[in-house]
Image (cartoon, coloured by chain):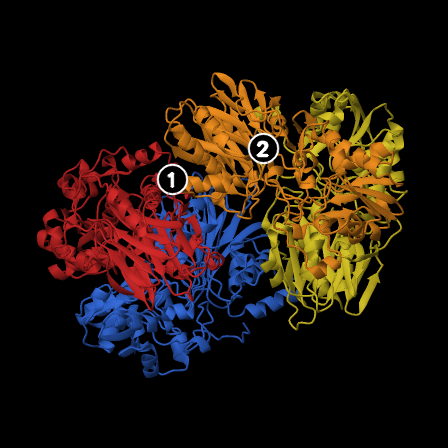
Chain colours: A red, B blue, C orange, D yellow
Amino acid sequence: MNCDHSRIKEACGVFGIYTSSEEQAANSIYYGLSSLQHRGQESCGIAVCDTCGSEGNLNVHRGMGLVHEVFDDNILHSLTGNLGVGHVRYSTTGETSLQNAQPLVLNYVKGTLALAHNGNLVNTEELRAGLTRTGAIFQTTTDSEVIAHLIARERIHTHSVEEAILRAASKIKGAYGLIIASPRKLIGVRDPLGLKPLCLGKRGSAYVLSSESCALTAIGATFIRDIRPGEIITITRQGISSNLELCQKKHAHCIFEYIYFARLDSTLDGVSVYEARLRGGAALAKAYPTEADLVTGVPDSGLAAAQGYAEASGIPFGLAFYKNSYVGRTFIKPTQKERENSVRLKLHVLEHAVKGKNIVLVDDSIVRGTTIAGLIRHLKQAGALKVHVRISSPPFLYPCYFGTDIPSNQQLLASSHSVDDICRIIGADSLGYMKVEDLPDTVNGLPLCKACFDNHYPMDIPNQNS
Amino acid sequence: MNCDHSRIKEACGVFGIYTSSEEQAANSIYYGLSSLQHRGQESCGIAVCDTCGSEGNLNVHRGMGLVHEVFDDNILHSLTGNLGVGHVRYSTTGETSLQNAQPLVLNYVKGTLALAHNGNLVNTEELRAGLTRTGAIFQTTTDSEVIAHLIARERIHTHSVEEAILRAASKIKGAYGLIIASPRKLIGVRDPLGLKPLCLGKRGSAYVLSSESCALTAIGATFIRDIRPGEIITITRQGISSNLELCQKKHAHCIFEYIYFARLDSTLDGVSVYEARLRGGAALAKAYPTEADLVTGVPDSGLAAAQGYAEASGIPFGLAFYKNSYVGRTFIKPTQKERENSVRLKLHVLEHAVKGKNIVLVDDSIVRGTTIAGLIRHLKQAGALKVHVRISSPPFLYPCYFGTDIPSNQQLLASSHSVDDICRIIGADSLGYMKVEDLPDTVNGLPLCKACFDNHYPMDIPNQNS
Amino acid sequence: MNCDHSRIKEACGVFGIYTSSEEQAANSIYYGLSSLQHRGQESCGIAVCDTCGSEGNLNVHRGMGLVHEVFDDNILHSLTGNLGVGHVRYSTTGETSLQNAQPLVLNYVKGTLALAHNGNLVNTEELRAGLTRTGAIFQTTTDSEVIAHLIARERIHTHSVEEAILRAASKIKGAYGLIIASPRKLIGVRDPLGLKPLCLGKRGSAYVLSSESCALTAIGATFIRDIRPGEIITITRQGISSNLELCQKKHAHCIFEYIYFARLDSTLDGVSVYEARLRGGAALAKAYPTEADLVTGVPDSGLAAAQGYAEASGIPFGLAFYKNSYVGRTFIKPTQKERENSVRLKLHVLEHAVKGKNIVLVDDSIVRGTTIAGLIRHLKQAGALKVHVRISSPPFLYPCYFGTDIPSNQQLLASSHSVDDICRIIGADSLGYMKVEDLPDTVNGLPLCKACFDNHYPMDIPNQNS
Amino acid sequence: MNCDHSRIKEACGVFGIYTSSEEQAANSIYYGLSSLQHRGQESCGIAVCDTCGSEGNLNVHRGMGLVHEVFDDNILHSLTGNLGVGHVRYSTTGETSLQNAQPLVLNYVKGTLALAHNGNLVNTEELRAGLTRTGAIFQTTTDSEVIAHLIARERIHTHSVEEAILRAASKIKGAYGLIIASPRKLIGVRDPLGLKPLCLGKRGSAYVLSSESCALTAIGATFIRDIRPGEIITITRQGISSNLELCQKKHAHCIFEYIYFARLDSTLDGVSVYEARLRGGAALAKAYPTEADLVTGVPDSGLAAAQGYAEASGIPFGLAFYKNSYVGRTFIKPTQKERENSVRLKLHVLEHAVKGKNIVLVDDSIVRGTTIAGLIRHLKQAGALKVHVRISSPPFLYPCYFGTDIPSNQQLLASSHSVDDICRIIGADSLGYMKVEDLPDTVNGLPLCKACFDNHYPMDIPNQNS
């Protein structure tokens, strides 16, 4: 993913494992979370417990930063236990506090519980108001704490934590991939529309839950299946059981997982992200053919679609940029004057690859347009004759209520400009956005939520202030 | 570049600027060094002075780590001055101490001097012994301190620092790209064989010296020319002057700069690194043709040669790996057992890109072979039918005395195994190394040092213990 | 206070201020907490809000470590607002987690609330069980979270936060000095027995609440009065009001505040800590007279009592030790072997002050006896003839349930040895402990809790597991 | 020592040990340096080597900060060897760079050498100019590097390092306590006037050199004797030998070591620092008698002299301040406005100790007068009737060239004001400075350098710019 601050942000990734008593869950979660790091870079955490211990205590460590920054050998060793859950987070609300880092660990009437949540509820305010009216206190601003309260209250009258989770899940509306560690159980929940991904894997006798399949591969687990939308899956020492009461016919998988969020080597709900992007590129080639000498992508997010465009158009696919991977988060940004003097941070044009050529440049999205405008300018300074831009998503026009951090309208170029205007603003010779009607084919006809492009939300959205 | 610890290391990169009195040299050096970061990641430093100030003092800051880790806004602001020099370093000797970080700043008979040096001398021991026999003391183990002593001693009898540098340069043997900041002058020196690169650029009225041209582009400077092998170039307020007394006909540019060290967007001695690698890939295609469905490279070091192979062979070029760029230096390495359980750190196979395909996999070198063996195994686990490996350099067989950190013989697979053996060990279906005789054509016939491949050293090498 | 890890620990200190809208509460709280640092060194925090702002949000920063380690200029500046509360904490339970750092900030039915609590409840378990049985979740292990839940639940049915606090306070049993910041009010609560101290001060138009008067002086505030045991004091823009419904006749102030916890320059409930210790020393002189040349105290905790002993006995008071104040928390402890070789960490005998003399050595308590035994050995090695030890507290024999971290019986020398035995073990020539019956006079007859010495608890203690 | 930034600073402390091959020198040096920390808090370092190893390499670690901040367990363990030298430093020149941290470790004609130096040379500029004129380069601004150069040059023509040191020492003028570790020898050198202290101790078969005796006691070594002024002492495996060629009759020990620098538990040149300060206090009592109820000292620097005043005058000695030892270097200073509002950082008046009393307040020196003025103001606010100030040193009137960092004239109150003026400025009721003629008796007639008070320098001072 590109480090550009004007890009779209995903909220979270979740990962859980129930392994044999000889193995440490924390190590696998560490590697699993590292493979989900693209889903959230602001904070992360791991909570574990020992299913064979008598106390049922959950140990947790959370911190601000990347997985390899927050955890070191000593901390991992201190997290003993064979069952656990982890979380990576990107704050969508601008509150980047440690307080909101997950997993949330809490004591309630039946002991302890750890929750890790990916997604966004749409009835948070209503639920929160109902809870505080009956005496609840909140120490974070996360949806997860709302879910925790609901579970704790339902647990008073129910016979099992799964039953309490089922009742809580029936009250929440929105997008969620949820993993809960109760001292002797690992429980996964997916929202009934399947907006957020969640899948199941197996390594030896261990079961694994993960936002994406790439994290299964990373730790050597085999992909078993996606969790069904609405399914509550419970993993215990005895094995797996499922509750399907909340399952429904209507599904709406987030298209943006395929276009942008998910990792190229993941497969979600049966569709390979890599292949979806290849097909997206091919659709662009069909919709917006052009004559050119080279098809290239903005590293790394546009490369797969560029390859798809190249294959479909017959124009050669090749490199056009060097990416400086040493530019880290603490890098000092050039001033406006320095930028005009061409201080280039991460992406550097390969002059000899582009000089005298007509180029198709593919990327996954345009937010403010400044990044792509800079790349086009650099390509032309290096001698490129024409630069035809192809974007593998339609223009963002409508807000997402399900956890995708699409910048506000003011920042979105597409919300106030026509495609022709944008083409001129960014300095491209032609510009083609993916057509909304081409999206379903890129994911083999999977039912989609593409409301941010077409305003068709898969559920009613209550009035939300935030 | 790949983070694999079994890869070849470059020693250093140097960057200097003499800008107008209104501009701060430190900022440009910061961005310049960031663009040379691939040449050294262990320590870095910047020394600056103000040519209009009366004192002629050099301020310096050095530290362990990457440029953006060592410098922050406060430190950059404290480095006031319009003339300066910077350095990035990878220790080739295993001594990773701060003491050895450069630039070296010293007081001598005529005031202060800052030195930044890329390369390795071959008569260091002899020079050092001569110096200590006449009372010199050494506080580092760098060649740069030897050069500094020579300059200081010559300066007693000479009329200018350039003359002292000339006399010092006539005593040292080996490879060097050297930048010296004397309070009112910026001086560049390149070894007579041209083993190490050094070039000149211009931005407005400012002159820039850099190990590679990519750092010129990064700060918006225009490439003027390469420093001639043996040239001593002096930049003052009055402009540029050169001393060519040490220039000679025989040149021997390091081939490994093109194969590996230099950045893809640099041009050294008139040859584009990108094009040299494309031609290298093409030469491999000609020397080792094969039938395949996909040509791919090990990201990022093998990608350009892979594209060259693809273009020459007509086999499509495409992606086969996802590279996790969030895996940093503090990442906890998986245990042997975890590795067997397939914990994969940085490179992840795109299953849908390789399944059922015959693949040509291109990389720039094989050191211990463990990395490529792992990639081949993962490709086959993902369904690749055949994996044909092509390496864009010949096997390393002889030591480098000029600053390239080639691992010792015990670690080098090629030093004790035949190509067939290596092919079997890494699990490839075929293996082809670049032929030594094909190297000159990849760089348009430029005179080369390729002693590490063919044992023909461009100068006598004195007995060296270290 | 001495850094000896075998010493008694206090749990917490609290500080709050309601100042005019032109001043920043955070700065005063910073200096106030620094003056209460002796009450807790493990974590600290500040929560503030702006009473003139419309939102009523509380900003909080908490961290592990000392006040000057956790807060810097940037953090203090970010804590804007004229009303706030701060806390310093030493964990009495061994859980030194950031999660438990205070103030606790929470959202509840009527907005936000920040709580800072000094002391320990004795019916926590019962209250917690009742709360979870009705759906509460707990994210910390602090008593403060229990209090917060009680307030939140009472607030549903009450007309003001003070009323909710009153109802909550009537349910909790134990020791507490509590400061609560509700966006427009600063509220202080003291337990009905007055076990924990809390006082009121004024600086200009600002009101201040603090565990000890020394923190008032530190910020230039004038001491007004102690909060009455059982009083709930509310500070608003309109001024001060009090609720005295929970006040009762029986009081029991913690004697250990005078002997050890409180700072020498504080006055609690009308009694100067300095004078109480002088009188304690005088009582020791009367109870255990001896012939000697010098009276000295263990720096810094025994100095005032030593001066009192000297004044009462007529034996000169003088220095006998140098205290190395550079020995910080990260100091590497000497090994057992090094200790035998006399590696001395903090306190060093002044040989010329003690040689050939008979000495009275005063300290405030003996826990394991190792520290005082070492000092006696060093005094004798330096030539002291006799060392008579006088301890300004009686032996600890009974547990404290109110927040004092008295080590467990196994660690307490006094719990298993007679005074004669202890005298022999520590190598003293005579040993005298303060008599329980002399304690009231040291505090001018103030009603005391001295249960840790005499087993007379001022309230029933429910069965507690932790 | 007080943290006031307007106080006098000492430059350095040195410590060396040659122990048996089974013991680690680094650990003892760590504890030794901690006991010398009052002599320098800016940077520190340890260099060690193994006398039984064949290579004779010196390992060194240096850093900015206190001993316990710069060294941790891992670093100490990495410093293997039984011979070593350490250094604590306070920069007197304002250059607080890591580059100047000591020990200086260097390679020269005969191998390696580590130097640690306390003091200041007066002919540095002349020596440095001579060295650079013959080709020397300097990488620090320390006198130690000058000494190192001299030794290296002399070593060419001499038979042993001791002989080279002797010749170097005969060229340097000024104050020095010097410890040199040559791989098989530990060598101590003291300036011929004895301006700087250096002493010898023994622990088992190990010999120890230290700036002060307190560091011997700290590690369990026995004090043997002071190094004679001008003596060069060499410790080898065979034992001790001395060269006395530079010894002379005239001695001039720095009086300020007794008044201020040295630790209260040290004995220098046969005089106990504690006793010297007691006698100083007694001399003040005799010179400036007064009626008062209490004698107290500014903690901690004025306490011993206060006790001396009390004993001589018969007025009781007692506490008047609480010192907050939690106020560290990162403490945020109060603004001017906050200070007026009485924000007090470190020293807090014990109101009940001073109210209604006439007080004698003793301190060791007055620099700018702001600290003592604040204390007097606070004492009076707390009810003190009269405050008579007694200073245990005469007024500073002349510069020190030997390493004491006396603030410049502008900052020194005494340089521009009469005693009466100063008394009025600081708000005292009377003020008495120690008389210069009383100083010799405080140190039992030891020959002194007291030039900063009386302008009688014990040697000619060359023109010095810095």
At which x and y percent is residue D455? 81, 36
Q: CA distance from mark 1 to mark 2?
A: 49 Å
Relative to D343, say whether D107 is above or below. Answer: below
Q: Secondary structure at mark 1?
A: loop
Residue A281, image x, y percentages = 16, 55
- Pick the residue in front: A9 or A46: A46
Mark 1 or 2: in front is 1
For the C terminus of chain A, the image quarter is: top left
Determine the residue located farthest toward the top in the rendered image.
Answer: C238
The residue where tag 2 is placed is D333
Residue at left 62%, top 65%? B131
Camera-side residue of D210 and B55? D210
User: Is the residue marked by circle 2 packed among few (<14), some (14-19), or many (20+) residues within 10 Å?
Assistant: some
Residue B16 is left or right of residue C316, and the answer is left
Label 2 marks a residue whose chain is: D
Residue A321 at x, y = what percent?
27, 56
Q: Which mark is residue C134?
A: 1
Is label 2 in a helix, a strand or a loop? loop
Horizontal relation, residue C335 to residue C66: left or right: right
Q: Are marks 1 and 2 on the same chain?
A: no
